[in-house]
Image (tube, rainbow, N blue to C red):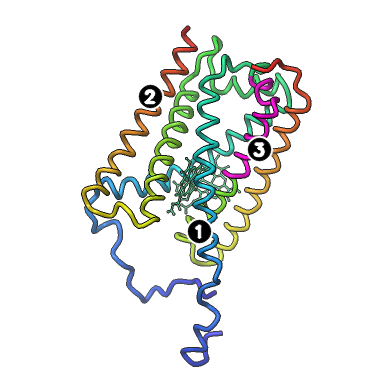
């Protein structure tokens, strides 16, 4: 196939030679969170909908996996819940930043770095607010 | 292929002339994802509870079921293109082809399953709207 790489050719410099910075972290996190949501997140979303479509028993089985007897989230519930919400808010922030880059804006070193750091601040803050709202409700 | 003149070897391997359009559609789906997933997250946070009747009753409302279906269309379109780019970046031989075919099946299965489930909930739920 025309796609097969010619191993006699050198590769361009890759991860090993670059100094890590916020811009690189944002880029790889965008890919990791997007792929994670597309696979694990999608699986959970479809499971949730199909369980609801089957009825109360199937929905209870779904809930049981992520909750304790008293209805509070269990460890898995917290890991999956916080992981998914943090992934979404990070991907959303870096996605919006990416749309500006696509338009040719924000390539100046300082503002590029600052917007990269802003995506982290945003995703942590938004995830925290989301969970405060959820937990406030659960604990009355 | 591969043993003609230099020109003959590269002819037909260039741009498929579809890349820019695909790229643009992916960006448009990013915009609709932004609106629809934010709507879902905020709505979930504001639901009074997460028991079966509340959640099913919520989904059963027309102005919830329809945006939810739009969300399924937007997100599946977006991740199908996104994952294809990821596959193309790392896989260069036959596995690329196999993974893209699997991705296509995965996407269509998710899309049909999710939309069917939403419609089933919408048309059969007896829960009270939240
Ligand atoms: C707020 C909503 C979202 C926005 C603004 C957004 C934005 C973007 C943008 C601009 C890209 C292109 C990046 C590039 O060209 O390198 C992208 C890639 C991607 N997105 Fe999203 N997205 C959103 C939601 C989602 C969701 C919900 C999923 C999964 C269910 C997802 C999965 C992906 C994947 C798998 C990629 C490919 C990653 C890569 O090529 O590195 N996105 N997103
Ligand atoms: C037919 C179904 C599936 C297809 C076609 C598929 C395809 C892919 C692809 C192309 C990648 C990116 C690989 C890369 O970076 O080169 C990926 C990553 C991943 N998949 Fe799947 N996947 C499927 C089902 C699933 C399911 C059901 C799960 C889990 C429940 C899953 C979990 C993951 C995880 C965790 C990653 C991230 C790995 C990483 O960080 O590199 N996948 N998948």
Q: Which residues are magenta?
A: B55-75
The answer to the question of whether label 3 and label 1 lie on touching residues, with beta carbons closer than 8 A, is no
* Res B114 quadrant in image: top right
Q: Are marks 2 and 1 on the same chain?
A: no
Task: Give residue B79's position: percent from left, percent from top.
Answer: 54, 48
- Pick the residue in front: A122 or A30: A122
Distance Cα–Cα, label 2 vs label 3: 28 Å
> Does the Cβ of the disc 1 residue fall within 8 Å of ligand 1?
yes
Q: Which residue is mark 3?
A: B69
Q: Which residue is mark 1?
A: B23
The answer to the question of whether label 2 and label 1 lie on touching residues, with beta carbons closer than 8 A, is no
Distance Cα–Cα, label 2 vs label 1: 33 Å
- Pick the residue in front: A50 or B115: B115
Distance Cα–Cα, label 3 vs label 1: 23 Å
In the displayed structure image, the side of residue A29 where residue B65 appears, left or right: right
Identity of the residue drawn at 58% across and 63% down: B97
Which numbered disc, 3 or 1, marks the residue that appears first in the sequence? 1
Q: Residues within 10 Å of mark 2 (few under 14, many from 20)?
A: some
Q: Nearer the viewer, mark 2 or mark 1?
A: 1
Identity of the residue drawn at 31% across and 67% down: A12
Verify whether residue B71 appears in magenta: yes
Task: Give residue A63's position: percent from left, percent from top.
Answer: 60, 21
* Res B1 quadrant in image: bottom right
Q: Which residue is mark 2?
A: A128
């Amino acid at each position: 196939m025309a796609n097969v790489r010619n191993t006699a050719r050198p590769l361009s410099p890759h991860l090993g030679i670059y100094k890590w910075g916020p811009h690189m972290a944002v880029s790889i996190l965008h890919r990791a969170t997007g792929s994670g949501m597309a696979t694990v997140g999608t699986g959970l979303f479809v499971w949730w909908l199909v369980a609801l479509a089957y009825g109360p028993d199937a929905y209870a089985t779904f809930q049981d996996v992520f909750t304790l007897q008293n209805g509070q989230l269990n460890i898995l519930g917290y890991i999956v819940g916080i992981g998914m919400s943090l992934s979404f808010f990070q991907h959303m922030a870096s996605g919006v930043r990416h749309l500006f880059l696509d338009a040719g804006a924000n390539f100046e070193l300082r503002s590029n770095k600052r917007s990269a750091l802003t995506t982290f601040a945003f995703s942590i803050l938004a995830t925290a607010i989301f969970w405060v709202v959820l937990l406030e409700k659960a604990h009355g | 292929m591969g043993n003609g003149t230099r020109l003959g070897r590269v002819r037909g391997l260039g741009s498929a002339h579809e890349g820019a359009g695909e790229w643009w559609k992916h960006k448009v789906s990013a915009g609709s994802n932004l609106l629809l997933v934010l709507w879902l997250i905020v709505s979930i946070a504001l639901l009074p509870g997460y028991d079966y009747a509340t959640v099913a009753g919520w989904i059963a409302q027309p102005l919830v079921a329809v945006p939810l279906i739009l969300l399924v269309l937007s997100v599946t379109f977006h991740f199908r293109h996104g994952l294809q780019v990821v596959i193309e970046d790392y896989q260069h031989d036959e596995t690329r082809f196999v993974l893209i075919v699997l991705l296509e099946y995965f996407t269509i299965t998710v899309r049909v399953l999710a939309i069917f489930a939403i419609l089933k909930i919408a048309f059969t739920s007896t829960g009270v709207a939240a």
